[in-house]
Image: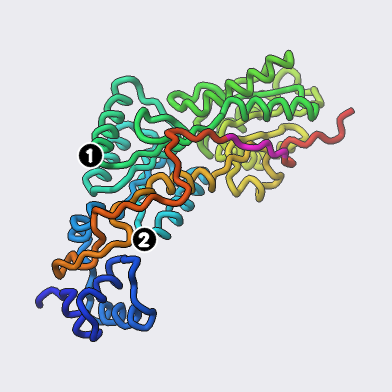
Amino acid sequence: MPAVRLSDVAQDAGVSLATASRVLNGSARVPGKAVADKVRASADKLGYVPNAQAQALARSRSGLIGLVVHDIADPYFATIAREVQQQVFASQSQVLLTQTDRVIDTEIRALRALIAQQVDALVLVGSHRYGTEADAAISTLLQGFERNGGKVVGLGQSLGVGRTIVLDNAAAAHELATSLIVEGHQRFALVEGIAGIPSAGDRTGGFVAALTEAGIEPELSCAAELTRDGGHVLAARLDEHLAGPGADDPRPLCVFAPADVMALGTLGELRRRGIDVPGRVAVAGFGGVPGAADAHPTLTTIALPLAEMARQAAEWVLESVPGRGADVVGSDDAAGAPSAGDDEPAPGAGDAREVHLRGDVVLGESTALTGLA
């Protein structure tokens, strides 16, 4: 059975080849709704699908954006991914999503695969350091991609290439610790030993700096992964600590988890162990994921502007999209694909290589002090 061509669709719909191509290839110059609906109905009936490879050649772009996250199960990454996808989809592009689990080989393979798919841009969410040699390998891939016309955006960590949304993690964590001290907290526990995640180190460092300024020394430091399961481990360690010396101290022990996913995991495990939150243990996180407001008790955290971060990243990768709104009718496969010569900058797009963002302190029920003189 011969392949259905665009000319077949145009003939079935009773329109010109140019009109059919504008409807089916994402042109800004689409005819009236009735005509467009008629063309799409004919395409569906005949089983016609535009040739994406031909379109990419005609446009000098694929309409694909590569999105790389560490863990899609983490609501921080899931929230950003959803917002980026919505913004990109509205521009008639598509997102290819991959997760790395913070494994260097996985990340390099993912980047190579996305580049091989000829994505127009790469958005890397989250921070990680794998070591000098491995980090250099990632930088080399990204630099080569940019030299060949691709765009690179980092959310949370400078990649040494492209544009970056930088989070002022240390300053925000310092403000959170200060707020907790002002509220009356005097006992603190921290998470340490999270290797290779600069953002976690910056957050913990800023929190400790505020405690030091107040003359407070953390009474417990725990090693755990920056995950929900890591939160369970943290809760078990807190349980052990509370059963040891100082068990009769009526003041709650306030633990700072440098990511909301970990803090929420800690809350859940403490509840399962029958430990009162916030009466016995107070919990604070960092990130501002939607679930923080739905937790019981509601989570104290730094609420980062996740939607704003995603929108800025999408604006950067979509600005000056080649061929937006133009038409070329030269072949049956590539007909209607926008030309590579008509650049149109996105409204409001700036030339800044970095944008610095900082979250807000949200004091929830998880750190509320009750019943203490």
Question: Is residue 315 visible to us here?
Answer: yes
Q: Residue at x 54, y 44 (%)?
A: 306
Separation of residues labelled 2 and 1 (CA atoms): 23 Å
| Residue lying at the far right of the rendered structure | 373
Which disc, if any, is residue 148? 1
Give the magenta range: 358-363
Q: Dividing the image into 4 quarters, which one contains the C terminus?
A: top right
| Nearest to the observer: residue 328 or residue 67 | 328
Q: Nearer the viewer, residue 298 or 148?
A: 148
When asked about the image quadrant of residue 217, the answer is top right
Question: Residue at point 35% right, 39% down?
Answer: 152
Position of residue 117 measured from the top left corner of the image (x, y, whole percent):
23, 49
Instruction: Check if residue 241 falls in the magenta segment.
Output: no
Query: Residue at left 19%, top 74%?
Result: 6
Q: How is the image coloured?
A: rainbow
Which residue in the protein does label 2 denote?
A: 92
Q: Nearer the viewer, residue 259 or 228?
A: 259
Q: Earlier in the sequence, mark 2 or mark 1?
A: 2
Identify residue type, mark 1.
Asn
**SS for tag 1?**
loop
